[in-house]
Structure formats: structure tokens, C-alpha cells
Image (tube, rainbow, N blue to C red):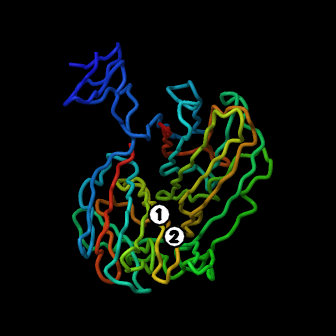
Amino acid sequence: MAIISNAVTIADAGAFSVSLGSMTHIKTLTASSSANLQFVHGSSSVILNNTYPIYLFKMINIHGANSQELNVDFSIDSGSNYSQAKTSTFFEAQHSEDDGTNTLAYDGDRDLAQSNSGVSLTTNVGNGNDESACAEMYLFNPSSTTFTKHFITRAVYYDENGAGVRDAFGAGYRNTTSAVNAVKFKMDSGNIDSGIIKLYGIKDS
Amino acid sequence: MGIISNGTTLLDAGAIDSGIASGAMVLLSTLTASNSATLDFTSGITSTYKEYMFKYINVHPSANNTSTFFGFQVDTGTNTNYAQTMTTTHFRGAHSEADNHATVQVGADRDQAEGTALQSLAYAVGGNADECISGTMSLFDPASSTFVKHFLSRANVYYEADITMDSFTAGYVNTTTALTRVRFKMTGGNIESGIIKMYGIV
């Protein structure tokens, strides 16, 4: 039975006919001294397939047990294996609280050239009590079996040693034509003490 | 009473059923400038959302001046000082209509090191009739009582010398007190027109 209001069909056949917005929250993971936070399609209500052409991850107040980098990696086998080739870029703006450092530079230590390592979202994030990282990452068309899997990232974070702020930009591709169906976030070493990561799907119709 | 269609619960208990995928970007407030000295969001910034997103659309200054910039500040509680301490970065890509200026550079004149001034989001916005700034800013977890408050902004501006300028600004408000207010203003003159929208991100 359709639900009709003022001659407009609001819902029919078990679904809303009107737009409820194009950005859909899928899943929130909360760290609690966690080795990693992992989104696997089909597990714990996670959707990461051809339902959406674009997926957006938001990382909010990620606080490491140590001053380490926040990394991300991608899997084509539901998280069994993350070590596959990626090529990426990384540059960042930096400004210290004492105004002594103020730079914009490419960071060749954080980019990848067909490397199996994780993708750096940050350099070392401070782990003082009030220090953390916030970031976002777009992952495009992970279910494609034709194209490589592109991603773009931006992160703002408190530099280690209370040195100031960094604004880091990353982008690249997971060099595979197989569908990506899992994404894992972790620190370089040590746990994610606290923080949340949200996954959204962006509709195209 | 639930409303069920084709065996699927669409509405129940006064809300869209949790099984229905719905919009994650919730419009909370829209402010429209009319030769306004400031545009202040003084309510709705709470712990309800972990991210608040602001969209500035066709913000047009009353002045056409190279020293004028569009920026923001924040405050806590019901305070109106808008002078919280920030450390920020700012860089921009720029290209002139005449094709004689193309660069990417740090804007050391627009960042702050533990400063309390209005934080620039875009500078030297043209004041001619068709010139303006549009952009977006995310403010993360403003209600946190543990962490500093991070923000990210990107804005494109019609620079008064006929240059397009892609402005990247980021930083943190160096306080563990919850932020409740956000102010946008020009450093010189008023915001003649434009709208700023605030969204909560579910």
C-alpha cells in the first residue's frame, strides 16, 4: 500500500519514494585500546560493495597509545590479506605553536610506489591527553572490476611533541582491478586508544 | 503505531525506522547576510553530532580591499568574546585571469600560532558585483571536554585582482572546553550578502 500525502507518493513497495538524502551513514566503529578498526563488507552490518559508487570515512579524535602515524589499507578478500600494491602521494602544511615552523612540502617518506605498506594519513600524531587527529577519506567505486581503486584523504592533527598543527593531503590508488571489500585503519605501532571512525555511502541516484 | 509497506517498517515510534537508510547530513540552520557585521551561529552546536559542517555560499563583502578577509572565530558557553586561541595553517593555489600569475604558496600572513584573532578562510575577496567566496568547513567534536577542537576548510575566492584562489585552512582551537558558538565575519566592512548553512553530520 502506498503512502500518499497531498497527491505525492511518500512511500511504496517497502521503500520511501521521496529523497531521504544522498549521504547515508552505514557504520560507526569506536576504538577502545584497539589494535585496528576494520570495515568488512557483510560483517556487522557494514556495506562496502556496489551499493554506493563513493564511500566516505570520517575519523574523529583518533588518539594513539603512542605518537604514531595513522594508516589505512585495503583488502580484496574480506580482510584476510591487506598487503597489496598501492601508489600514492602525500604532502602537508605545518605550523608550530611557537611560529618557528611554517611550511608546505611534499613528504617522500610517506608516499608509496607500488608498495604493500599501509597508506599514511598522517605523520606522527601527538598522544598527549588533549591531542588527536581528525581526517576524512573518499574511496571511489571499490567494487569496480575494471579500474584501480582511487582514494583521497585529508587529515588535521596535533603534531607530536606539542609542536603545532599539520594539514596532510594524500591520494592514490590500490593497484587492483579486483573489488575492494574491506578497509582497515591502524596506528603504525601500538593501539588506537580512543576515537571513532564513521563510514558513509554516497548515492549516485 | 508503525507504518509498514510491503512488509517493511518505514516509520515507527515517531521516527524513520532504524532499518531505513536515511540522510546523514542534517541541515540545522541557515543564516542570510544583509549587510551584516557578523553571522553568528549561537545555538545547535552540542554533543549531538561529532562533526558540524558549514557551507558558505556566495559570500560577498561590502568592501573591495586587499586587506579584507573572510574568517571565523568561536566561543564557549554564552560568551561573546570570540577570541579563542588557535594554531592554524593556510596555503593557497592561485591563477589570474590574465594567465600571468600561477602559484601555490603558504599564506604565513593568514595563519596563527596560538593567536586569538579572526581566522582567515579566504582573503582579499573581490567586492565587485559578481565577486564572492564559496567554500566549506568541518568542525570536529566541538563538545569534547578532552581534546582540542580540529577544523578543516577549503574555499574558493574571487580575489580582488581578478585571480581565482583555492584556499586551504586547517588547525585547532586550543581548548578542552566545549565550543558552542561560531562567528563568521569580514575584517573590513560588512558581509553584504550570501548565506552560510550549518549541518550536523550523523
As shown in the figure, which amino acid type bears the numbered disc 1?
A: Ser
Q: Is residue A70 left or right of residue B199?
A: right
- Quadrant of residue B130 within the rendered picture: bottom left
Query: How far from the left and from the top, in percent, is residue A143?
Result: 64, 33
Could you say which quadrant of the image residue A174 lies in?
A: top right
Q: Position of residue A109 (x, y in %)?
A: 75, 60
- Above or below, comparing residue A157 to residue A174 in the picture: below
Q: Type of residue at label 2?
A: Ser
Is B15 left or right of A145, judged from the image as shown?
left
**Residue A75, which numbered label?**
none
Q: Mark on residue B167?
A: 2
**Which SS class for mark 2?**
strand
Q: How many marks do you count on the picture?
A: 2
Of tags 2 and 1, the one toward the viewer is 2
**Residue A33 position within the rendered picture, expressed as x and y whole percent measured from the top left:** 55, 41
Residue furthest right in the image: A114
Real-space CA distance between mark 2 and mark 1, rounded to the nearest whole angstrom: 8 Å
Chain for disc number 1:
B
**Relative to A12, residue B72 above or below:** below
CB contact under 8 Å: marks 2 and 1:
yes
Which one is in front, B44 or B99?
A: B99
The residue located at (50%, 45%) in the rendering is: A194
Mark before the other along the chain sequence, 2 or 1: 1
Quarter occupied by the N terminus of chain A: top left
What residue is shown at x 42% (from left), y 65% (from top)?
B134
Q: Does A104 sit left or right of B171 as displayed?
A: right
Q: Residues within 10 Å of mark 2 (few under 14, many from 20)?
A: many
Residue annotated with mark 1: B153
Q: Chain of mark 2?
A: B
